[in-house]
Amino acid sequence: MLARAAIRRAPQVVARRGFQTTRAQLSSPYHYPEGPLSNIPFNPRKKGFAIKYWTYCFVGFTLPFGIAVFQLNHPAKS
């Protein structure tokens, strides 16, 4: 019964709180520019980005497998 009363009253409480938002103050050190491509640490529109990106992906994928194959073919000497 208490739950029903709380549910019935919830919309009134939310409406009374007066939620509001303000625009981000860009002069603050805690807010950054918003919009597309502003939240990533690189610029994909620069010349040569595709080469760097695919090189990074290739090395990041093949390096662990290359290390594993090397260690399997050259066991540690004890």
Image: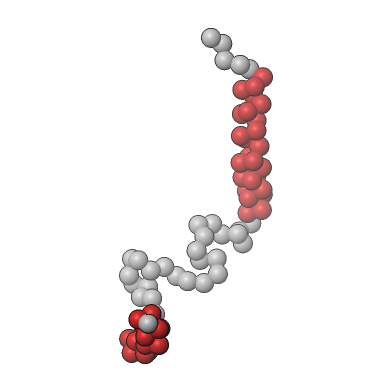
**In the picture provided, is 67 more to the left or to the right than 14?**
right
Q: Position of residue 4 (x, y in %)?
A: 40, 83
User: Which quadrant does the N terminus fall into?
Assistant: bottom left
Residue 21 percent location from the top left of the image: 38, 82
Quadrant housing residue 24: bottom left
Quadrant of the rendered structure where residue 47 is? Answer: bottom right
Residue 62 falls left or right of residue 29: right
73 and 37: which is toward the camera: 73
Tell me residue 75's x, y (percent).
61, 16
- Left or right of 45? Residue 24 is left
Residue 10 appears in view: no
Q: Is residue 51 above or below residue 20?
A: above
**Residue at point 65% right, 30% down?**
66
In the image, taking residue 6 as reference, residue 53 lies left or right, namely right
Q: Which residue is at 33% across, 66% downward? A: 29
Marks counted in the figure total: 0
Query: In percent of the image, x 40 and y 88: which residue is there?
Result: 8
**Which residue is found at the position 53% from the left and 9% from the top?**
78
Question: Is residue 9 in view from this perspective?
Answer: yes
Q: Quadrant of residue 76?
A: top right
Residue 67: x percent and y percent?
61, 29
- Colour scheme in use: secondary structure
Q: Is 75 or 55 nearer to us in this picture?
A: 75
Q: Is residue 26 above or below residue 14?
A: above
Relative to 74, residue 30 above or below: below
